[in-house]
Image (spheres, rainbow, N blue to C red):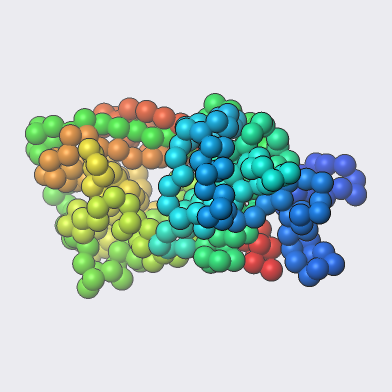
Amino acid sequence: MAATLEDRTGLLTGSRPAGSVSVFEEYLRPNVYGRRDACLMSNNPIPAIRPARRSDLVALVEFLATAPHSEGATDTPGAPVAGNLANRLVAVYGGHITGAIHYTTGPGYTAAITPPRLGSWDEDLAARLLSAAAARVRRKHRAKLIQTLVAAQGADAMGAALVRAGFNRLATLITMRRPVTAADLGLPVSDTITWRSYSRLRHGKFVATIRATYRDSLDCPAMAGLRTAHDAIRTHRQTGRYRPKRWRLGIIGHTPAGVALVSALPGRAELVYLGVVPEMRGHAVGRALLNRAIRDAAEMGAPQMGLAVDAGNTPGLRLYQAEGFRETRRRVAYFVPKENLDTLEA
């Protein structure tokens, strides 16, 4: 079953009054100054959006400490200002900060944008902040995969702002956890599978196998084509503590059947990716890969194991539940589709 992708019409084909433009289109439309940030000019009677400055630090800390929790936001109202101020944009009106947004970038051309914080909920301002952040990570950092995670409760309001900003709904992501015990050291692993750990010499085989697992995948299928498998590996290596010995390639005969990549996070092991090539699906390869990953977690001494799965991936969800994983949280993922990436870059 393919993942259900809502709001696929997104920004350019969404319903709105004839002759009007979306926030995303307005933000990107050139003005007489030859700039794309027409909405951001200080002489407009709306908040100006710009990068945070050192002079904003005190006001920004105060704003984030007192601003209410935005609809669908996943951070806390009192979240401190962390990291480089260059990774924050602020909305300023009348000399006061009325909104702020933060983004992070990572290897593999990825960027994560947190839902904006606002003095009071304003869908238009939220959309403008999201548009500005997406344009910045695309132009400055060449991001290909630009994502935002929204709490499942309150997703409708923030989701509307995200769609106006040029994002599409990607999937509902289910976070799952499972205790790991000494008994897991004896989990059965198929005798027909030969296991190979990741190394520089095997990089090409891992890339080719991961690329093959993307075909007809039920996990976030809308992401297909945004990045290469090589980009994905660069991202996976930065998730927690990279453990190449725990990155497994399963081979049946002479044919790669799938991969299971496990990393170490504080207090747990994380299954950062599990994929089976199409020809091997339906033959219990996924269960063998998962058992191998759980055994790796036990050998690492991790007290528990975590993972995230697309709610639309019914076979994968059933497999994880059968092996003792239980849901701990749901979030809705949004991303900038490829056609809007090209517009951001223009």
Q: Nearer the viewer, residue 46 or 147?
A: 46
Left or right relative to 43: residue 169:
left
Horizontal side, residue 345 vs residue 314: left or right:
right
Q: Quadrant of residue 15?
A: top right
**Percent x, y of residue 251:** 23, 59
Q: Quadrant of residue 206?
A: bottom left
Q: Tell me what residue is drawn at x 14 percent, y 45 percent.
A: 300
Residue 317: image x %, image y %?
A: 38, 34
In the figure, is residue 202 to the left or right of 346?
A: left
Question: Could you tell me if residue 308 is visible in this image?
Answer: yes
Q: Nearer the viewer, residue 310 or 300?
A: 300
- Residue 221 in the image: above or below residue 135: above
| Residue 314 shows in the view | no
**Label tally:** 0
* Quadrant including the C terminus: bottom right
Q: Position of residue 125 (x, y in %)?
A: 70, 42
Residue at 87% x, 48% y is 20
Comparing 124 with 107, the one in front is: 124
Residue at the spot 9% in from the left edge and 38% down from the top edge? 186
Q: Examine the rendered structure and indicate whether residue 76 appears above or below residue 169.
A: above
Q: Residue at x 64, y 55 (%)?
A: 50
Q: Residue furthest bottom?
A: 201
